[in-house]
């Protein structure tokens, strides 16, 4: 966690790891199909993401953004602030509507080993992070699609999530977004 967020009240990352692991175990018992578990855990993440945006707006010194890139950067700052993950954004393309969020370790996957770490294993253990991203953007009136393209639990060197902005509110009522005037 960066120095600028050190004064915020935090929970022990091991508590998060164990609690999340318990939730995942219960979901795996309740749903046989990994795709259902992935969907349920992502929906939980959506709820978390929307709440994190509210907290971020209350506790950070953000300024309204003038671009999609700035919005993405604010969202990844929230990762550092609340999740202790220090991601970086890579590969902006398509007028900044597509980008990749890359990060190393995270509390959701500490102490975890998948029974089958091959890329063909369909459970996306940290899919809650995709949900958090979707929920954060959704709160800002932006619809995104995101998915893991690299997963450390499946043998990759780091985690990478592809994010694609699918729809933005036409009236630009995004809390973090002030669109430039037509003359800019």
Image (tube, helix red, strand yellow):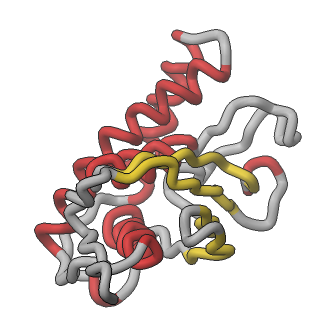
Q: Nearer the viewer, residue 70 or 30?
A: 70
Pick whichever, 104 or 15, lies toward us: 104
Query: How many labels were placed on the picture?
Result: 0
- Tell which residue pokes out farthest to the left in this image: 58
Q: Is residue 5 above or below residue 93?
A: below
Q: Is residue 64 above or below residue 143?
A: below
Which quarter of the figure is the C terminus placed in?
A: bottom left
Quadrant in the rendering for residue 90: bottom right
Image quadrant in which the N terminus is located: bottom left
Determine whether, in the image, residue 102 is placed left or right of residue 166.
Answer: right
The residue depicted at 63 percent of the width and 67 percent of the height is: 94
Q: Position of residue 58 (x, y in %)?
A: 11, 68
- Give residue 27's position: percent from left, percent from top: 51, 20
Q: Is residue 173 above or below residue 18?
A: below
Q: Quadrant of residue 48?
A: top left
Left or right: 178 as drawn, with respect to 103: left
Residue 176 visible at all: yes
Residue 140 falls in image quadrant: bottom left
In this orientation, does residue 7 appear? Answer: no
At horizontal 17% and vertical 83% (from top left) the residue drawn is 61
Is the residue 96 above or below the residue 6 in the image? above
On the image, the x and y values in percent for residue 105 come to 61, 65
Q: Position of residue 11 (x, y in %)?
A: 29, 59
Residue found at x 28% / y 88%: 4
């Amino acid at each position: 966690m960066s120095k600028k967020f050190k004064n915020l009240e935090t929970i022990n990352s091991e508590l998060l790891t164990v609690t999340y692991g318990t939730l995942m175990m219960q979901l795996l018992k309740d749903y046989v199909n990994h795709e259902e578990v992935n969907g349920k855990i992502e929906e939980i993440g959506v709820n978390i993401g929307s709440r994190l945006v509210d907290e971020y707006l209350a506790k950070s010194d953000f300024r309204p953004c003038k671009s999609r890139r700035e919005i993405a950067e604010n969202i990844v700052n929230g990762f550092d602030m609340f999740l202790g993950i220090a991601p970086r954004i890579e590969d902006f393309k398509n007028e900044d509507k597509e980008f990749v969020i890359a990060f190393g370790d995270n509390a959701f996957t500490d102490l975890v080993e998948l029974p089958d770490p091959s890329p063909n294993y369909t459970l996306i253990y940290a899919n809650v992070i995709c949900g958090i991203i979707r929920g954060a953007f959704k709160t800002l009136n932006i619809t995104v699609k995101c998915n893991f393209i690299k997963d450390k639990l499946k043998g990759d060197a780091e985690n990478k999530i592809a994010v694609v902005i699918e729809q933005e509110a036409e009236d630009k009522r995004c809390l973090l977004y002030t669109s430039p005037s037509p003359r800019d």
